Amino acid sequence: MKNKTEKNFMKRQNILIPILSIALSLVVAAIILLILGKNPLSAFYNLLQGVGLAPKARYAGGKSMVTDFADFLNALTPMIFASLAVMVALKGGLFNIGVSGQMLVAGFITTVLIGYSDLNAVIAKPLVIILGFIVGAIVGGLIGFLKYKFNINEVVSSIMLNYIAQYIIAFFINTKYVDPVSRQSKNISQSARLTLMNMRIGGFKINIPLAIILAIITVIVIKFIMDKTVMGFEIKSVGAGKEASRYMGINVGKKTLQTMFISGGLAGIAGVTYFLGYYGSIRPNVLPAVGFDAIAVCLLGNSNPVGIVFASFIINLISEGGNYMSSQAGVDREISAVITGLILLFSACGAYFKYKLNNREKAVIKESANKEEENA
């Protein structure tokens, strides 16, 4: 009975702590907006309007709440994959801070090999996903190999590879693939793009993100692997304690490689859904912020695949709705980044919140036991 009570309490904690983190961040953000002389409720409503969750006062031709929400889902897709990449690494006791670099490498190589090819959509679109996973997995696997073979900290190698990827790819874009007008890489073919652009449906021009369904399927698959398979158990075991895992007969080095291979592969899919989906080109010398925001999402989602979906929704709502909030409420665009940062800050305080909730639960249980003794 006690174990069941503790299990239920842990489930409540997994829900309460993220809600508390979001609530506290919004309260602090509201105070900041008040100091700036703005109405917090109006500003937060603007966030909802910006992503199609609330109606705007007026729309341009071919636009509506539906088109805004479709654009929001388009931006949400790479965030889910990137957050899953961070989560898998964390479960294995690793911190993959190189998700942005893995996204960039996968996006660039896939763009060059498939995005600029003459392949038809039936062949090109699946190949984009497959190649994206493979390239990301190779980069992630390299980080895992350096960790296993030479005990090089994955944070250090990830950061270094981020810079290497950023500048090498910028060189190739600027010298071989640059668009002279936009100064970004040339646009990919529509047959290779993972977003159906400007589709006419009911008089609206909708950008349909094809990979959002794959993202939801991947969430289910990753949760199943982590919760129900031997591989998932071994990855979590290594993450919980390497020495104990060795004692159990688990090959720690192999699991480190496997963890980073999967994490990198998911980051690779995030990269192709970002550069060959949400965007149709690559901006040189810039790492995608999605890879870093994914850390906040993973923390907020308690490193749980299902929690990550909801956390991705919240973080993307703030980041994508920020432009509209800025234009309507008259606040700087950076305010949305401040809110995201506050969520990350309070999410990092999750251990403290858990400590306080545990103490409160123990006090309640003790008080209940004392009452039972008095009644007896």
Image: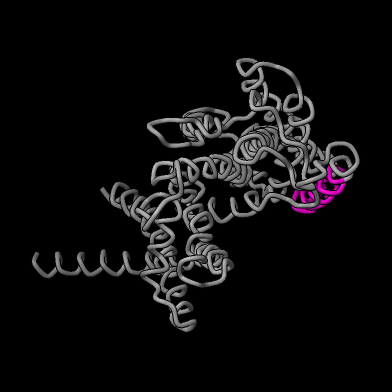
Residue 76 at x, y = what percent? 52, 44
In the image shown, does 305 or 267 lie closer to the viewer? Answer: 267
The stretch drawn in magenta includes residue 160: yes
The stretch drawn in magenta includes residue 76: no
Instruction: Give the total number of marks visible in the rendering.
Output: 0
Q: Is residue 222 visible?
A: no
What residue lies at 78% left-to-right and 46% top-to-bottom? 181
Q: Looking at the image, is 325 positioned above or below residue 55? A: below
Residue 27's image quarter? bottom left
Magenta residues, as a range? 151-170
In the image, 367: left or right of 257? Answer: left
Residue 100 at x, y = what percent? 70, 47
In the image shown, does 37 or 200 lie closer to the viewer? Answer: 200
What residue lies at 46% left-to-right and 49% top-to-bottom? 60
Instruction: For the C terminus, give its image quadrant.
Output: bottom left
Residue 323 at x, y = what percent? 53, 60
Q: Going by the picture, which residue comes out furthest to the front?
A: 61
In the image, 307: left or right of 168? Answer: left
Q: How is the image coloured?
A: one colour
Residue 173's image quarter? top right
Q: Looking at the image, is 349 positioned above or below residue 155? A: below
Residue 177 at x, y = what percent? 84, 37
Which secondary structure type mostly characterizes the magenta part of the structure?
helix
What residue lies at 37% left-to-right and 69% top-to-bottom? 42
Q: Looking at the image, is 27 positioned above or below residue 161? A: below
Q: Is residue 84 visible?
A: yes
Q: Going by the picture, which residue comes out furthest to the left?
A: 375
Residue 103's image quarter? top right
